[in-house]
Image: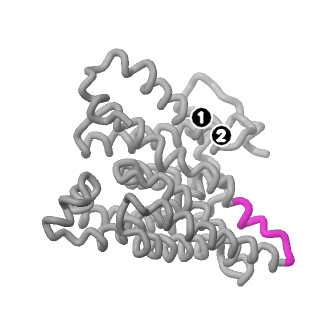
Amino acid sequence: MVMNSATFSINLLADLQQMFQFEFMQHAFEAGTIVAIIAGIVGYFVVLRRSSFAAHALAHIGFAGAAGAVLFGIRPVFGLLLSTSASGFVMAILGPRAAHRDTQIGIVLAFMLGMGVLFISLYTGYATEAYSILFGEILGISSSDAFLTLVAGSIILAAIAVVYRPLLFASLDEEVAEAKGMPVLLLGIVFMLLVAIAASIAVQVVGVLLIFSLMVTPAATAQRLAKRPQRVIIISIVIALMATWLGLFISFYEPYPVSFFITSEVFIFYLFVRFIYQRIKPREVYQTNSQ
């Protein structure tokens, strides 16, 4: 393995130059940067709308879609995108109210996992590509995967720019937004589709089982550091970016999974903010954002 032969020095510039000589590291940083930005933004709304279970469920549903794609001989990422988007739409239709959404999400999740089991049982070969989605394989991302991630990320950013204000309003107070005549159901559908696409591209980095690390933890941490939505989103992006870049950097020199480093970093930082930083910051931040 090339990474195992690499040696770390105290010259950061030389280390970076050595790292970026390898094409797979370039693609990993490109895709990781896009995923971190998208996860930081979408994750804010996920936490604000208390929809962490939706992100978790859509990631698992993505595995079922990837398994189906392998069975039918197409690229797993397309099956992943199709299954999460369709399931996100159905979840939004079945559970328009946040109070009842978890039940509908659980129903759709159970059905799709059953489909995933069927697809895997019907496939006679070894579905390596589908299984890799469980844990992420950012160091195996190709240039076409990086480009697809860029396209998906651009679509999410453009959609959020269009619906940011009404989505933020509906997320803060769904009942008041509905009373004012806002299209709450439509916004819910758009939100679930955004989560579906974001989860689909994020699993390439951390995998299905660790999706919370980038979709939820940075946003939850950021909510404890700021009050204004824009600042929370920026901090959430910065945390996700730092964790992803540092995880990739460390993994270049150590023979352990990138997802392990990324999830450990965001978790440790959350604990630091939760139990140490909280003691030295003005209390109003935590009173406003306490969970």
Question: Residue 128 colored magenta?
Answer: yes
Name the amino acid, label 1: Ser
Q: Nearer the viewer, residue 94 or 151?
A: 94
Residue, far right: 124
Residue 69 horizontal/vertical position (percent) = 67, 78
Q: Position of residue 173 (x, y in %)?
A: 24, 54
Q: Amino acid at mark 2?
A: Phe
The residue carrying mark 2 is 260
Label 1's element?
Answer: helix
Circles 2, 1 touching at the beta carbon (< 8 Å): yes
Question: Are there few (<14), some (14-19), or many (20+) residues within 10 Å of tag 2?
Answer: some
Q: Quadrant of residue 248?
A: top right
The segment highlighted magenta reads: 124-132
Q: Is residue 232 shown in magenta? A: no
Q: Which mark is residue 264?
A: 1
Q: Is residue 238 left or right of residue 208?
A: left
Q: Is residue 90 above or below residue 197?
A: below
State the SS at label 2: helix
Q: Is residue 202 left or right of residue 228?
A: right
Q: Quadrant of the C terminus?
A: top left
Give the residue displayed 77% in from the left and 73% down from the top: 120
Q: Residue at x 25, y 52 (%)?
A: 172
